Image (cartoon, rainbow, N blue to C red):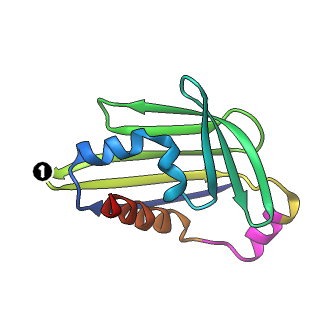
Amino acid sequence: MRTQEATTTVTAPVAEVERFLTDVEQWPRFLVGLDAATRVSHERWVFCVHDGNDRREATVAVRRDAAGHRFTWRSLDGPEYSGCLALTPVDGRHTRVHLELRWHPGTFLAALAEMVLPRGDRAARDLRELEGALTAR
């Protein structure tokens, strides 16, 4: 299983970042490997994820903790795909964003490739993409 964490500070108030993240269909704009997010019911989504040549769909529970400014998700079937986005207001114009990712390769070859050539910058890249998506709004 792969686990990564990264933290950055974005130039946007926490309310604006939270509004953006509430629209889970926007998550493929910044989460590397997430091709699509389709809502199927309350707090249930189908995520189309890819990791190299491994492409799959996973039913995912997405929860928002409004009081704690957190979004969590976890796959309900198949290999693990889970994470947490935690927001902390820095001041009226800046928000600290902490991202934790956990995923398990879906195939033996993907797991072997990760052992040989691990990618250690995925979470940091996701946060750079998030900052770009917030700026583009």
Q: Is residue 69 above or below residue 55?
A: above
Q: Which residue is drawn at 38% across and 53% down?
A: 98
Front-most of 25 and 117?
Answer: 25
Q: Is residue 72 above or below residue 108?
A: above
- Residue 122 in the image: state x and y as whole percent: 55, 66
Q: In which quarter of the image is residue 61?
A: top right
Quadrant of the snapshot with the C terminus: bottom left
As helix, strand or loop, the secondary structure at mark 1 comes to loop
Residue 83 magenta? no
Q: In this view, does 63 lie above or below 115?
A: above
- Residue 124 in the image: state x and y as whole percent: 46, 67
In the image, which residues are magenta?
110-119
Q: Which residue is drawn at 42% across and 62% down?
A: 127
- Give amino acid for label 1: Gly
Q: Residue at x 53, y 46 (%)?
A: 83
Instruction: Locate residue 73 relative to residue 92 in the image: left or right.
Output: right
Instruction: Locate residue 102 relative to residue 13 in the image: left or right.
Output: right
- Residue 5 in the image: state x and y as whole percent: 48, 58
Main SS of residues in magenta: helix
Hey, which residue is sitting farthest left in the picture? Answer: 92
Quadrant of the snapshot with the N terminus: bottom right
Instruction: Locate residue 73 relative to residue 20 in the image: left or right.
Output: right
- Residue 133 in the image: state x and y as whole percent: 39, 61
Hey, which residue is sitting farthest front in the picture? Answer: 137
